Image (cartoon, rainbow, N blue to C red):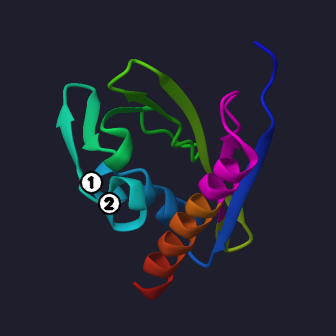
Amino acid sequence: MTPMPARIIHTTIDRPWRDVYAFASQPENMPRWAAGLASGLSREGEDWIGDGGPIGKIRVRFTPRNDLGVIDHTVTLDTGRSFENALRVVPNGDGAEIMFTLLRQPDTDDQAFEVDAAAIQTDLSTLKHILEQS
């Protein structure tokens, strides 16, 4: 497969990176900041099941907890189609940088790609607000 165009969407959060990772890596917290998971996730073995809204039921498998700030996850749709999502938290001074790598899928037009990017930026901004207010 040819490499897909990519965009790294990031936000600086004024909290220690380990605090950001501890909160953001918990699937139970994701409905608070990731709008696409607002209905919540329920555990099913190693996976988490959620309602992806217009895309239907989703199955999410997260990378195991780690000391590197990696929150990568695979999202699988009811159709069987899967998407690998790279989400990282890294130190940035006394704070953190959270970065999502958005890969443009072959069947995604310019407008849909921009909508996806904006939604991810909104999610990261929500996460920033939650963590900087607590």
Q: Quadrant of residue 46?
A: top left
For the point 34% across and 45% down, the residue is 52
Outermost residue toward the top?
Answer: 1
Compared to 78, does 88 lie above or below?
Answer: below
Compared to 86, does 33 lie above or below?
Answer: below
Q: Amino acid at mark 2?
A: Pro
- Locate residue 43, reporting x and y percent: 19, 37
For the point 77% across and 48% down, the residue is 7
Q: Is residue 5 left or right of residue 23?
A: right
Quadrant of the frame with the C terminus: bottom left
Which residue is the site of mark 1?
28
Q: Is residue 40 left or right of residue 16?
A: left
Q: Residues within 10 Å of mark 1 (few under 14, many from 20)?
A: some
Task: Find out whether residue 100 is within the magenta segment.
Answer: yes
Q: Quadrant of residue 30?
A: bottom left
Label ID, residue 31: 2
Instruction: Tell me the element at label 1.
Output: helix
- Locate residue 34, reporting x and y percent: 42, 60
- Locate residue 99, reporting x and y percent: 66, 54
Task: Find out whether residue 110 is within the magenta segment.
Answer: yes
Q: Nearer the viewer, residue 122 or 99?
A: 122
| Cβ atoms at labels 1 and 2 below 8 Å apart | yes
Magenta region: which residues?
97-117
For the point 70% across and 56% down, the residue is 114
Q: Quadrant of residue 103?
A: top right
- Locate residue 96, reporting x and y percent: 64, 66
